[in-house]
Image (cartoon, rainbow, N blue to C red):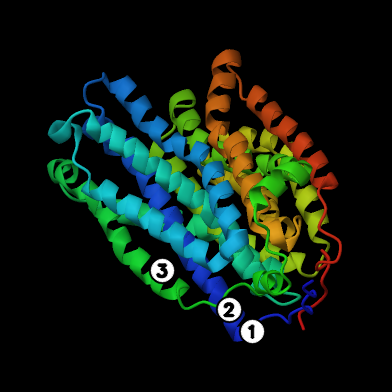
């Protein structure tokens, strides 16, 4: 009978820093590729891949391919999490980055409807599914590599740095499309839209070069050395740990709803319901994105010194209470007041998203940690992130008021708070309150 390995020491500080930077770089690339698709879907895909439909239907079909990736994320989370717990975190992160890069490059090279007919949108949908699966497997692995390599007093901060990857990816995607949009409409429609997708090949190459040089997670090495690697981690998670999966899913939902209503639905609400200039709302979203890139690591750092779980659930309570303030300031039409509303709403969001990686990383035992975290988190993105703008649109159309949307956000916050209170870190792992760094 194999003897349990002794607790491994944390990786050297220089090694763990390389790991978190590599995880952040890879996650940024993944989100860049994810967001350039969304931008292209809104700008050109309806005309290039769905031209046989009228303008409205073509736009809806184009945007539906963007939403499809959220459905694919839990599949990727389950698949890559399962093999990540069997073969290691590092190998799966190499696979997910390669898969995302390959799918994105193929989209950049994909013939349009005019060239190959109905095969074009079919291939586009398949490639989008691959993108979603890749991102579903990426998050859990990137967070675990960073958190498990970090020593006491740095796990919250390192995990939070990885969570800024979405913000960096969005900024990079917007910058590239801003540059390509300077060309003529004819050139952009003919080939310019392909440039952001083709550029991803260079980014992926750099990302793979960095990731291939990383050491495996010490927690996984400890599991392997003790002979505790599971043959069927996914089956074990679904049969023995499903309550934790459900609680994690519900605990994530308030953050997803807050982010996507404030950054996605607000564009439609401000322009169509309030008659605001779309560029002004985009500027607000861009500024708040920069704010979160700074605030998320701060709260991750704070969670290494203060009870992490308490920050997490208190931030959900605040997100549940503040939509009424945010909508009131948004309706003012004043750029300054609107920006104030975004900051007020996104302080608790940043606190929640900044503490989430280290908190979620310790919910499941190490032998099934990649699978459990990936499935729980990605299911939350389906019910929180993916559906939030659709539900918000339906509620406003049905009531003619933002009050119903705010109540929806509050209800999600109540559910999320209860789930967070019952969600606990595993006994015997690093406690939520770590003390000052050694």
Instruction: Indicate the position of residue 364 as horizontal and vertical percent values.
Output: 75, 56
- Extreme front residue here? 1
Q: Which residue is mark 3?
A: 207
Label 3 – label 1 distance at C-alpha: 21 Å
Do residues under tags 3 and 2 come within 8 Å of each other at their CB atoms? no
- Tell me the element at label 2: helix
Residue 383 percent coordinates (x, y): 61, 34
Q: Earlier in the sequence, mark 3 or mark 2?
A: 2
The residue closer to the viewer here, 168 or 11, is 11
Q: Residue at x 36, y 45 (%)?
A: 37
**What separation in Å lies between label 1 and label 2 (alpha carbons)?**
6 Å
Q: Is residue 21 above or below residue 337?
A: below
Viewer-side residue, 119 vs 401: 119
Please state, as top left, top right, bottom left or bottom right, where the N terminus lies in the image: bottom right
> Which residue is rendered at x = 66% and y = 53% of the image?
233
Q: Pick the quarter of the image with the C terminus.
A: bottom right
For the residues labelled 1 and 2, say whether their Cβ atoms are less than 8 Å apart.
Answer: yes
Give the image quarter of residue 229. bottom right
Question: Crowdedness of circle 1 by 10 Å Cα count: few (<14), some, many (20+)?
Answer: few
> Residue lying farthest top?
398
| Circle 2 Cα neighbour tier, 10 Å, few/some/many (<14 / 14–19 / ≥20) | some
Residue 332 sits above or below residue 8 on the image:
above
Identify the residue at horizontal 71%, vertical 27% (top origin). 407
Q: Which residue is mark 1?
A: 13
**Which residue is under mark 2?**
17
- Identify the image quadrant of residue 327: top right
Lateral position of residue 187 relative to residue 94, left or right:
left
Say if residue 417 shows up in the picture: yes
Residue 374 percent across, percent down from the top left:
62, 51
Distance of label 3 from label 2 (alpha carbons): 16 Å
Q: In this figure, what is the number of numbered marks?
A: 3
């Amino acid at each position: 009978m194999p003897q349990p390995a002794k607790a491994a020491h944390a990786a050297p500080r220089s090694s763990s820093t390389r790991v978190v930077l590599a995880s952040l770089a890879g996650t940024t690339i993944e989100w860049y590729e994810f967001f350039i698709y969304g931008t292209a879907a809104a700008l050109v895909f309806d005309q290039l891949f769905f031209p046989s439909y009228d303008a409205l239907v073509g736009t809806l079909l184009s945007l539906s391919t963007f939403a499809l990736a959220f459905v694919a994320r839990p599949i990727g989370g389950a698949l890559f999490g399962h093999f990540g717990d069997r073969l290691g975190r590092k190998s799966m992160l190499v696979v997910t980055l390669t898969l995302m890069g390959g799918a994105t490059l193929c989209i950049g090279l994909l013939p349009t409807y005019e060239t190959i007919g109905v095969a074009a949108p079919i291939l586009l949908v398949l490639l989008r599914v691959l993108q979603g699966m890749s991102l579903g497997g990426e998050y859990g692995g990137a967070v675990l590599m960073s958190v498990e390599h970090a020593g006491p007093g740095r796990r919250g901060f390192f995990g939070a740095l990885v969570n800024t990857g979405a913000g960096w990816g969005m900024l990079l995607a917007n910058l590239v499309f801003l540059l390509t949009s300077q060309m003529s409409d004819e050139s952009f429609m003919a080939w310019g839209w392909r440039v952001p997708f083709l550029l991803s090949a260079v980014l992926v190459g750099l990302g793979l070069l960095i990731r291939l040089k990383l050491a495996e997670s010490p927690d996984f090495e400890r599991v392997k050395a003790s002979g505790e690697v599971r043959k069927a981690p996914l089956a074990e998670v679904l049969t023995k740990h499903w309550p934790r999966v459900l609680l994690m899913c519900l605990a994530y939902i308030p953050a997803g709803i807050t982010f996507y209503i404030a950054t996605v639905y607000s564009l439609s609400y401000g322009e169509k319901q309030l008659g605001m200039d779309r560029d002004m709302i985009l500027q607000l979203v861009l500024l708040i994105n920069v704010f979160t890139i700074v605030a998320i690591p701060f709260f991750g750092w704070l969670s290494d010194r203060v009870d992490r779980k308490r920050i997490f659930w208190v931030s959900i309570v605040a997100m549940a209470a503040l939509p009424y303030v945010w909508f009131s300031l948004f309706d003012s039409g004043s750029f300054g007041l609107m920006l104030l509303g975004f900051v007020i709403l996104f302080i608790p969001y940043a606190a929640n998203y900044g503490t989430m990686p280290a908190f979620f990383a310790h919910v499941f035992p190490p032998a099934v940690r990649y699978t459990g975290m990936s499935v729980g988190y990605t299911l939350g993105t389906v019910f929180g992130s993916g559906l939030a703008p659709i539900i918000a649109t339906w509620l406003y159309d049905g009531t003619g008021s933002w009050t119903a949307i705010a109540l929806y956000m509050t209800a999600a916050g109540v559910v999320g708070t209860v789930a967070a209170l019952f969600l606990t870190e595993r006994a015997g792992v690093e406690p939520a309150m770590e003390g000052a760094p050694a």
